[in-house]
Amino acid sequence: MFLDRVKPLDAILATAEKKSLRRSLGAFQLMLFGIGCIIGTGIFVLTAAGAQKAGPGLMLAFVIAGAVCIVAALCYAEIASMIPVAGSAYTYSYASMGEFLAWTVGWALVLEYAIAASAVSVGWSGYFTGTILNETFGIALPAWLTAGPLALGGAPGGFINLPAMIIALLVTWLLMIGTSESAKVNAVLVLIKVSALTAFIGLTLTSADFDADRFNPFLPAGVFGGWGTGVGAVGAAATIFFAYVGFDAVSTAAEETKNPQRNVPIGLIGSLLFCTVFYILVAAGAIGTIGGQPIMGPNGVPFPAGSAELARQCAMPQYADALVCSNEALAHVLRQIGFGPIGDMLGYAAILALPSVILVLLFAQTRIFFVMSRDGLLPESLSRVHPKWKTPYIVTAVTGVLVAVGAAFFPVGQLADIANAGTLYAFLMVAVAVMVLRRTDGQRARSFRVPGVWIIAPLTVLGCLFLFLNLPAAAMLMLPIWTAIGIVIYVGYSRSRSHLGKGIVEVVDDIGGSEHAFPIDTPKGE
């Protein structure tokens, strides 16, 4: 019963053209959006958490995560250029596997982007309190204003991360003003960020403190830390995978892109390849200069990242300078090797640049909500576009408040793992959608085709399942719990109000601009 509603692809494209967002983004802006999300999240925020899971094996973790991302990006490139509308994996699933599975994907994307934006807001707070307040002005905020409660993995004496909450709300306001304006600000921030990381690579890899012995043992927790533990090189790869959602965010902007058939594949693959190189080089510089060994528990297994146990260990004097305990990892590395002023400059760059990551994640999340609302699966008021700003301002405001609350009370490590559960499910479904559409709509024009799709797409499915099973058990459980909540909403609200279920799919005639219902065969009583 629940697999009976597949939305015709022609109707999806026609509906988007009728009630669409303004097309204002080019290939270069799309690539900057991807770079803005990928680099900032993975390097500035997750370096410490990844090192705690894998030690120097973080290098291998980036390779593992990057390999899965490459095959996933190829699937995204084909389907996003074929279906250049907002909605990302949600829309792709709607056109290939039906409304119910599309709903589960969209619901997972809501979790992915919102939690990821909260995680990066927490990362920004670490640089702000460390570089701006402490290093520059000598101001130390009380612990209860800079971290969540210890019981949630925050810090001893923590209650609320006020800077994280404030930056999430400020970025929300920027997005409400307008997409084009946001893209221009993002371009400047990406330039600052890339320049800062280039300087970091040059200083660390050529430093006298760089010592290859710091990479030994290379895999202190092994390649596999064990199912459900979230440690080891594969466990770290599962965590840092969420840093690559930048290329997914590019596809969600397809409906606001000029010449999407050309520009979307360029933005997707270009941003991924550019950022993967930076991941590996920056991680090598950080570990090679001050080390990156994890803090081990009594059983010889690293304490979980984002846990109360690790927070207690990091509060001890012997771990004060450890990479895995730093809230501003890269600036901390430069200070440790004698480049304090440059470390502060890098901290300033992070403070300026990390909002671009939050911006891209919130941008993508609100566009998922927008298109689900446009399909009738969520209240249609959410898709209301502001008459002046031309943005979905209602859903942007609601999302921003929820993201700010998450950032205020939870640590970055836990947030990243939870976000990954939704990310990996969505990526898996995109690979399935590519294969389905090759069978059901193989003649439709595709400006980019996945080479060897019957090898690449199954590899994407297997890779996503593999990383999902290496998340911490709590993060793995979050997806089925969140999905169950979504199914209740779908059955109780969305299915009966779906435009497709009512046989109403709006299109615009070429002559006269009149509207009519696209013919849909819907079972009686549905």
Image (tube, rainbow, N blue to C red):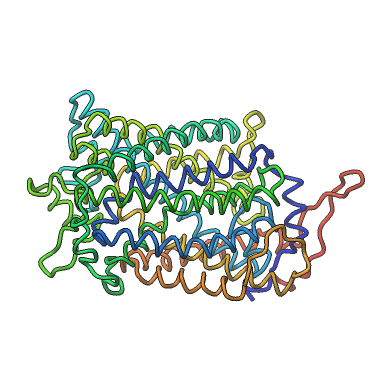
Choose between 126 and 410: the one closer to the eye: 126
Decide: is 476 above or below 287. below
Location of residue 348 by image quarter:
top left
In the shown orientation, is residue 24 left or right of residue 106? Answer: right
Q: Nearer the viewer, residue 126 or 334?
A: 334
- Tell me the residue at 56%/35% (across/down): 183
Rendered location of residue 35, percent (x, y): 49, 45
Residue furthest left as drawn: 317
Farthest top residue in view: 137
Left or right: residue 301 versus residue 16 is: left
Q: Position of residue 15 (x, y in %)?
A: 75, 51
Front residue of 422 and 379? 422
Q: Could you say which quadrant of the image residue 478 lies in?
A: bottom left
User: In the image, 29: left or right of 465?
Assistant: right
In depth, the one of 110 and 136 nearer the eye is: 136
**Total marks drawn?**
0
Q: Quadrant of the N terminus?
A: bottom right
Q: Position of residue 512 (x, y in %)?
A: 91, 43
Q: In the rendered view, would you say 211 is above or below 198? A: below
The quadrant of the picture occupied by the C terminus is: bottom right
* Residue 29 drawn at (x, y percent): 58, 39
